[in-house]
Image: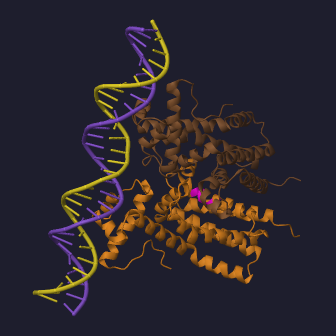
Chain colours: A brown, B orange, C purple, D yellow
DNA sequence: AAAAAAATCAAACAGTTGTATAAAAAACTC
DNA sequence: GAGTTTTTTATACAACTGTTTGATTTTTTT
């Protein structure tokens, strides 16, 4: 698995293009789309202002390209697990215990990914999109976020024996999902609350453990007893 | 209890000031601090550009004042409940079952508030602050968010018998908190998933019920059994 | 090495930004 | 109602915005 943000060939032009995408991601994340200027993006990439028009046409297309890259990266992170789960769901060979394990595994992966370097910039861009979605975001949502949410619901339904199409399973899954993303969405709050300068892998491990426990308690509590 | 956003006297100047604060909250929420121009804020309030300098000195002070108003509003929503809980915590007269009930009550209140109108604009501003905190956010965090988060943690600790100062209780509380705010932070996602045009009180009720269940399952699961 | 293509660059463009200024209007006080 | 304070207004300012242009440099191809 590659899992590289904005992969490119070693051509001169391709490299410059990639450099622009990387610094664009960073600046868009730091300062938002409208407030990140093409001049500072170009400068951070060691390029001239005109380079953006040359490679992407305009600022908006550059942003769309950044979102595309984010989507590809996110899919590459969970793609393998997701594909396998979809297969087992289709074949009906997913038992409740495995489903619960899979749920925890996905949550752990998401959490772990969110602590690392690359995702930090992705996170900022995605949070801004949540509060005011752009046109380009629709694509990211449809191709990446929604399919994942849908898969999570179906896996959760298997874990608890609920109806995967019913509103209860959807709401429950969304609540569980919230337990994970609150650590990135309200990251500033938890960082200050824990009194640390920066959230590191050791925090991700602890948080992952807590979420595992909560998922177990909720899933097992909702499953009719069978002793 | 008043619970009004940016309360003011009926003086001419005070009213103009309030109008500016209201449209500032709206524009800052819609477009972010840097991209919301003082001109459009003034125009939306039926005022001239210079009014902002006249009443607030500059744009940044206006923003700080908006955040102050948000803090006051948030505190007014949960203030009574919070005060009572703090008293009972100090007096040691809060038993685990009552603590758990209080937790659910607070979550219900937050959820209910978030379906209504005013909170929508507040929500946008706060989400933006989470992804890139401004200096003014320090105040909001110190006077409003942190005390509430702290209270929730202590109540949760009573409900489960955990150490209220330890990181585990903090992380657990934050995770529970996430189950609530995910329905506002990712409100568009859940709306589409449920296939409804608008989230109404009936959805708030169902979501509240689900969160109640989850809180019960987690709290009871963490409390050592007592036959 | 010559020719062609690709990449980089500085300068200029029309708009918009936050803020400052000073005059005009309105509201209030006596 | 005159005098004072408060509020509103239009205008000016320098700094910055995204984009366009045309020339120059670098790289690739022949």
Residue at x 62%, y 76% (from the top left corner) = B82
Pick whichever, A107 or B145, lies toward us: B145
Stretch in magenta:
B179-183
Q: Position of residue B161 (x, y in %)?
A: 79, 70
Q: Is residue C25 above or below residue B111?
A: below
Q: Position of residue A29 (x, y in %)?
A: 52, 47
Quarter of the view holding residue B92: bottom right
Pick whichever, A60 or A179, lies toward us: A60
Quarter of the view holding residue B28: bottom left
Q: Main secondary structure of the magenta part?
A: helix
Work out which quarter of the rendered image holds the C terminus of chain B and state it.
bottom right
Left or right, A86 with respect to B39, comes to right
Counting every numbered tag in the picture gives 0
* B41 in magenta: no
* B181 in magenta: yes
Q: Position of residue B180 (x, y in %)?
A: 62, 60
Pick whichever, B3 or A198, lies toward us: A198
Residue at x 65%, y 64% (from the top left corner) = A193
Residue B156 visible? The answer is: yes
Q: Position of residue D4 (x, y in %)?
A: 21, 84
Quarter of the view holding residue B143: bottom right
Pick whichever, B175 or B129, lies toward us: B129
Left or right, C2 with respect to B111, comes to left
Residue B47 visible? The answer is: no
Q: Is residue B175 above or below residue B91?
A: above
Residue at x 71%, y 81% (from the top left corner) = B90
């Amino acid at each position: 698995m590659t899992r590289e943000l904005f992969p490119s060939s070693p051509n001169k032009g391709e490299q410059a293009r990639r450099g622009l995408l990387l610094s664009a991601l960073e600046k868009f994340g730091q300062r938002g789309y409208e407030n990140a200027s093409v001049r500072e993006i170009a400068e951070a990439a060691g390029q001239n202002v005109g380079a953006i028009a040359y490679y992407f046409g305009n600022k908006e297309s550059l942003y769309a390209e950044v979102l595309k890259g984010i989507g590809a990266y996110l899919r590459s992170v969970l793609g393998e697990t997701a594909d396998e789960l979809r297969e087992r769901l289709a074949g009906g060979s997913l038992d409740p215990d495995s489903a619960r394990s899979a749920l925890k595994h996905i949550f752990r992966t998401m959490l772990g990914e969110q602590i690392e370097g690359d995702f930090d910039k992705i996170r900022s861009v995605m949070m801004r999109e949540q509060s005011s979605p752009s046109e380009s975001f629709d694509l990211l949502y449809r191709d990446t976020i929604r399919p994942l949410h849908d898969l999570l619901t179906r896996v959760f339904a298997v874990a608890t024996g609920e109806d995967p199409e019913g509103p209860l399973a959807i709401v429950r899954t969304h609540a569980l999902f919230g337990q994970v993303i609150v650590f990135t969405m309200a990251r500033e709050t938890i960082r200050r609350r824990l009194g640390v300068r920066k959230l590191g892998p050791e925090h991700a491990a602890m948080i992952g453990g807590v979420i595992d426990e909560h998922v177990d308690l909720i899933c097992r509590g909702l499953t009719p007893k069978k002793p």
